[in-house]
Image (cartoon, grey):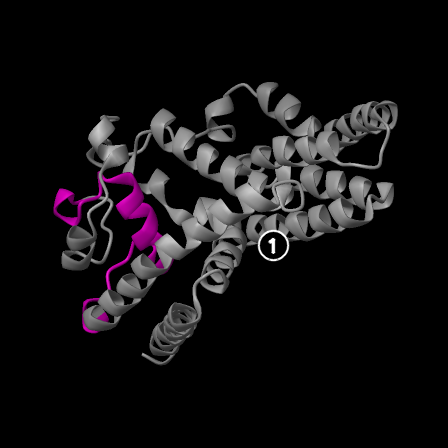
Amino acid sequence: NDGLFIFLAFLFFAILLKFWHTKGLGAWYALCTVIGIALITKVSSFVFLPIAFLCLLFLRGLPMRTKMLHGTLSLLLIFLLSGWLPILRFSEQDITRTLTIGNDGMNDAMKLSNSWENFLSFNPARIMKVPFNNPWDDASNRRYYFEYFLKSSLFGEFGFKEIQPLAVLMLTAALLLLPLTFLGCFIDLKRSLSAHLPLLLTAAFIMVAALTYRFRFAYSPNQDFRFSTLLIIPITYYAIRGIAALPSPLRRMGQVLIVCFALLCSGFLLWFYFR
């Protein structure tokens, strides 16, 4: 169901932006329809609910009475589309067969601790030394959440020893783009929070959901970026926003950096396809 979920996630965001800019109720109900379908596709879709309804709450140009009315009606629509599934599952004699959340029952060899160090430690040198994840092996530094998250965004949980130099270059470019991404996010928070609220809410809630999921179900595979693929949009936007805010000489270097990163990623995909 990951493929369908990713499609619905990007469709959700596209319709959310349309609703935010047009204030059209047709777009709002299309958005709620996508949420309803996504909820029966993957539990991760629950993160769409606060994003959508906070956008409705803070949208300018609609009276609060209208927001309350359509907010209530849309919750009913979402329940009609997806509420039948948990009712059906809970009515089964053995719900563990079809209603398992958080990959409960994973092999204990993949279990991790929830120490502060695991969530706060981020060492670029350690990432360069071991560029690939292995959910079974501590030698891959699997316990460090953000290191695992970054590496999985490029290579998943797989190792490609044949192209390790290319992998190191990709990770180097990604690490150099990270400060620019944070810079772009800071600029939007400071200058145009309301204009870019859907983007900020999407990034914030997906990251909070990913962290909460890993904390609640402390297994190494639950740190994978594949649960948070919609983050690609805000990360790309904020990286470009950060580059655009740089002084002229540095801006040119940032542009070269992001183009090089795209070319390196394309090279990896071509190698993977033709190998």
Q: Is residue 126 above or below residue 96?
A: below
Task: Judge from the rendering whether residue 144 lies leftward or rightward of residue 203; answer left or right.
Answer: left
Asked if residue 219 lies in the magenta stretch, the reply is no
Residue 225 at x, y percent in the picture? 40, 48
The answer to whether residue 184 shows anywhere in this view is: yes
Q: Which residue is mark 1?
A: 7
Identify the residue at horizontal 68%, vertical 36% (top origin): 52
Residue 144 at x, y percent in the picture? 23, 40
Start-end of magenta stretch: 137-163
Q: Secondary structure at mark 1?
A: helix
Which amino acid lies under the numbered mark 1 shown in the image of this protein? Phe
Q: Closest to the observer: 129 or 181? A: 181
Identify the residue at horizontal 83%, vertical 27% (top origin): 73
Could you classify mark 1 by the number of other residues whose Cα lies within 10 Å: few (under 14), some (14-19), or many (20 or more)?
Answer: few
Residue 87 at x, y percent in the picture? 65, 21
Q: Closest to the observer: 219 or 174? A: 174
